[in-house]
Image (cartoon, helix red, strand yellow):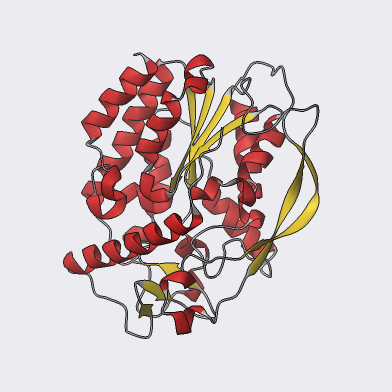
Amino acid sequence: MTKTSCPSAFAVSRRDALRGLATAAVGAGLSRPAAAALQDFVVVGKDGWLFAVFDEVRQFEMGRFRTVTQGINDAVAVLKHAGIETVISLTPAKSRVYREFLPADFQFIPEVEKRYDMARDILTKPGTLVPDLSAVMLGLRKANPQVDYFLKADTHWTGDGAEPCAIEIAKQINAKLHLPPSSKPGTQLGPVITAKQSNNDLADGLPDAQAAKYGPQSYHIHQVVQSGGAGLLDDDAADVLLVGNSYMQPKYGFAPMLSNQLGRPVSLVWKVHQSSPYKTLLSALSSDKVRNQRPKLLVWDFEETDMVSLTDQQDVWGPNVIKSDVFLTQLRSTVGV
């Protein structure tokens, strides 16, 4: 069960989103990076590193942050009431993991420094499992600094970053949750292979002369080996549902590794980030397959920057905005509670 989108449409929507978010930031009174650091709404860092303008580290709105995190907790409570155990996969911001490459006038303020840990503190209070993926990725960087765990000229992580995060989430699920035995095995993985990211969404947002400086990027991922005719993503017997944004694309290896480490099939629904984690969740839970085979476990993916993006924030979600109370009402209706 895979939701994909046309690459060209993705490039257009991402460019429009970057432009809208940059405009909103300036309208809110934020200082723009110097001209050398901001080109066509992409933050140009050091040593060939690019960052998205929405990966904002110079401001923090506590009221918005509390509204968003409490809203997620309310949604998780609905899911748990419906018998769907929920784990939050919270991907750290690229700026957090590679902060030394940020330009001089695009630096963390103290409140944003604490943002990831504060989000985990709030989201775990009701007992929800929220593994510390920031610690995982920072640990990877310390152990193997020569490996890129995010793509330098793209918003996404690499397989080298995605797979260890999936392993950590599976490890904690296996240790702390008690899923019944699965009737089918997880995805079998083969040797590590080299994959290539040919299109870079951040570089594509630069003027053509600048974009030409950023070529294809390679990363490592485990090859998927199908066994017994069972696929990973379209298995009707899957009782684990992974819902997320384009970080969850199979090409980065998160879903196959999660299935492998859990030892059971995983069903995947992903849409581009602008679809919003809220609309994407409603869409996933409304599908016939999920209605007929309600998951026992939902892994719901967020980016760290989502923690300050309201459900109805037009400059972030575009046409996919939804009022928080409407989202909860629709969620209750969808899961029947």
Residue appearing at x 32%, y 59% in the figure? 111
Rendering coords of residue 272 (x, y %): 44, 48
Residue appearing at x 41%, y 71% in the figure? 205
Rendering coords of residue 33 (x, y %): 32, 78
Specify whether residue 335 is in view: yes
Q: Quadrant of residue 287?
A: top left
The N terminus lies in which quarter of the figure? top right
Q: As rendered, which of 233 and 192 lies closer to the eye?
A: 233
Q: As rendered, which of 240 and 144 lies closer to the eye?
A: 240
Left or right: 328 as drawn, with respect to 267: left
On screen, residue 11 above or below 173: below
On screen, residue 287 above or below 214: above
Q: As rendered, which of 177 and 263 lies closer to the eye?
A: 263
On screen, residue 211 above or below 52: below
Specify whether residue 113 is in view: no
Rendering coords of residue 315 (x, y %): 25, 55
Residue appearing at x 29%, y 35% in the figure? 71
Rendering coords of residue 303 (x, y %): 44, 49
Residue appearing at x 42%, y 51% in the figure? 304
Left or right: 33 as drawn, with respect to 284: left
On screen, residue 31 above or below 73: below
The C terminus lies in which quarter of the figure? top left
